[in-house]
Image (cartoon, grey):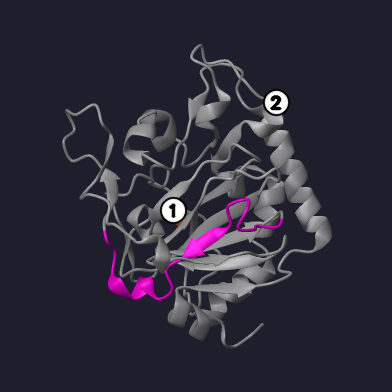
Amino acid sequence: MRNSLLEELEANGYAVIEDFLKPDEIEQLLEAGKKLCLEAPQEDRKVFSGVNSDKAQSREKYFIESGDKVRYFFEEGAIDEKGELKLDPLNALNKVGHALHTDIPVFQNITCCDRVREICWQLGYKRPAVPQSMYIYKNAGIGGEVIPHQDASYLFTEPNSTLGFWIALQDATQQNGCLQFIKGSHKSGVHRRYIRNPDTKSEELLVYDRAAPIYPQSSFTPLPVNAGTLVLIHGNVVHKSDLNRSNKSRHAYTFHIVETQNTKWSEENWLQPPKDKEFPIFYEAE
Ligand code: FE2
């Protein structure tokens, strides 16, 4: 493990570890991702869009209750007006979340592996927990855009401790929608938050607390990576990914960790631990 990991993360807001997964681990996760496609619901399919999230996520109940479940979000273009699939089921999902790390052994094994613990330890986490996980498909020709955002807008702790683990399961290129970052933008605080609507009478369960900031395209640096690469994402760094217009899919497995020692998980976050429970804890430092 490089001792420069923390410096890299602190300088850029992200850090890259190549060959984090072994080829057989990549295969296992890809296989598990395929299985999820075949297990996805055949009716009342829900769509996810990263473009206009406040409206698209207004299938909000399904989303808001997904923290401790395995739930399936389809690409907007994959479903016709009657709710029927227009595409091969293997090419129709946007993502599956948010409890793969607790409910499906193959994802649990990677999430809780010694390499992940070692990174948390090295970065100084005292009592890290995993609030959520997702399988992201970004399928060929249909994989949706993810608008510029900071992960801490969605998973907010005080003080900030949110760290994304994003693992490429296929090569991520500029053609198929690799991650793009504004280097150093994690030093500018959290720009807006996505919270449970304080107006409990509103039909909208989740809202942004302010309008989306404008980030010029020229400020983004694309980060193409090979399959098996881990990208660590600071909770405050601005990042995005474009539509996948290519003929190659760009699958990824991602999860987050947060500190739980002397750190408060915001009760305004969309995601809350199950009643009277904590998010799964990795270890507790002496
Ligand atoms: Fe993100």
Query: Residue most toward the right?
Result: 24
Q: Which residues are magenta?
A: 171-191
Q: Which residue is mark 1?
A: 278
Which residue: 64% across, 85% down? 2
Q: Which residue is mark 2?
A: 88
Which residue: 68% across, 58% down? 110
Q: Position of residue 159 (x, y in %)?
A: 31, 70
User: Quadrant of residue 35 in the image?
Assistant: top right
Cβ of mark 1 under 8 Å from ligand 1: the answer is: no
Query: Residue most toward the front?
Result: 218
Pick the quarter of the image with the N terminus: bottom right
Q: Is residue 225 above or below residue 89?
A: below
The answer to whether residue 172 is magenta is yes
Q: Main secondary structure of the magenta part?
A: loop
Mark 1 is surrounded, within 10 Å at the Cα level, by few (under 14), some (14 to 19) or many (20 or more) other residues, namely few
Which residue: 62% across, 64% down? 224
In front: 188, or 222? 222
Q: Position of residue 188 (x, y in %)?
A: 29, 72
In front: 181, or 268? 181
Q: Secondary structure at mark 1?
A: loop
Identified by mark 2, the residue type is: Asp
Residue 260 in sight in this render: no
